Image: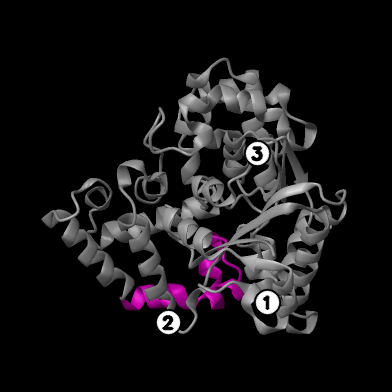
Amino acid sequence: MNTQLIADAVRNSRGKAEETVWDRLFAFWFRRLVYTQIWEDPEADLAALRLPVGSTIVTISSGGCNALSYLTARPVQVYAVDLNEAHLSLLQLKLAGLRAFADYAEFWQFLGEAASVANSALYRDRLRPMLDAETRAYWDRLNIIGRPRHAYFTDGFYRHGMLGRFIGLAHVLAKLARIDLVALLNGKVESPERREALDRLHRLFHSPLARLITATPALLFSLGIPPQQRALLGGDAPLNEVLHERLLRLVNGHANETNYFAWQALHRAYRGPGDTCLPPYLQRSQFERMRDGAGLIIPVHANLRQFLEGLPAREVDAVVLLDSQDWMASEEIRALWTAIDRTGSDDVRVIFRTAGKESPLENEDLAPLREIWRRDEARSADGFARDRSGIYGGFHCYDRR
């Protein structure tokens, strides 16, 4: 079921006759745990959405960070929909932690620091009894060396998953290139050490090795980039140069002492505990709100469009699409927005990211959608500026005309 849903989503971007071996390989690859942390900034999302208290939100779940963080807006319901059962299992584990752990210190130890040998006992004694059978089976499953998945939380959870391992490989390359990642993360902007690190980073990204890595679609699968999104990401520019520019935005665009995305990229861990440089759901001041609101999060294993089509009309106040439309052909995008139009309230807002700069709704073949939906230029620009992860080319906020 999981593999088939993902395969269908990848195939949405092209006809069956056009499907390539890379598409089939990505569908197989993406059923794994890809993201241990979501790479869209929830604070940028909420600033763009400006939701009233009591809203109903539908979002793609990914690792569940944002679905939980949206509880700070005091919604009445958050549907977290995803094709990937591994990501939903992670969200279920976080929800179990909010129900099971005695206080913020335990919640932080398991899901924030996520690197204590004591977490094995916490999982066995406190979390496992709270999980449904499918989620329990996922975290109990042994890998090829006989180690259960829940052991990821004993040695640095954020170093695991496809993206976590890719970042680990990037750290090895940075070490070989003598790039001082500590200087990039903590150095003063104009310090000689940081300038040298940036110069070495430029040389690495413009090396033959970087061009080779970015020329092979499979090597970008660990970033969660399917073949068709890879083309949007690169556009007319060489992909190694685009990725270099995005990384510079990540490490230079916002103060790193408050940018937890930069900490995950350069340090492979959060800076916390506390209230600074953390996603909202992991902040100490938000713990009681997360615990009180955990029952409002509804994980859903489904295709997003089909899920929306099953909801009552005028049910939803906000839809968060992440970058999912980069995977889609025009026909699927049109069907998705038709479903949003039916199930969205009069004041519904839709936000999403794109690998490239342009919104797919601005394409000529989707012109009829623009008769119903208007891109809010100011909120879109503000969302792009606020997004601390810096890895996307565009941030888009739409509402009804």
From where the camera sits, is residue 259 visible?
yes
- The residue depicted at 49 percent of the width and 63 percent of the height is 392
Tell which circle, 2 or 3, labels the residue nearer the N-terminal end: 3
Q: Which mark is residue 237?
A: 2
How far is mark 1 from mark 3, CA to CA? Answer: 31 Å
| Residue placed most toward the observer, 175 or 260 | 260
Neighbourhood count class around disc 3 (C-alpha, 10 Å): few under 14, some 14–19, many 20 upward: many
Residue type pointed to by label 2: Ala
Tell which circle, 1 or 3, labels the residue nearer the N-terminal end: 1
| Residue placed most toward the observer, 43 or 375 | 375
State yes or no: residue 215 in magenta.
yes
Q: Which residue is mark 3?
A: 91
Task: Tell me where the magenta segment starts and ends, as one range.
Answer: 207-232
- The residue depicted at 51 percent of the width and 54 percent of the height is 163
- The residue depicted at 71 percent of the width and 83 percent of the height is 365
Q: Secondary structure at mark 3?
A: helix
From where the camera sits, is residue 146 visible?
no
Q: Secondary structure at mark 2?
A: loop
Q: Quadrant of the N terminus?
A: bottom right
Q: Secondary structure at mark 1?
A: helix
Q: Residue furthest front?
A: 401
Q: Which residue is mark 1?
A: 21
Residue 315 placement, left or right of 248: right
Q: Nearer the viewer, mark 1 or mark 3?
A: 3
Q: Where in the figure is residue 334, as x and y percent of width and height?
A: 77, 71
Residue type pointed to by label 3: Leu
Neighbourhood count class around disc 1 (C-alpha, 10 Å): few under 14, some 14–19, many 20 upward: few
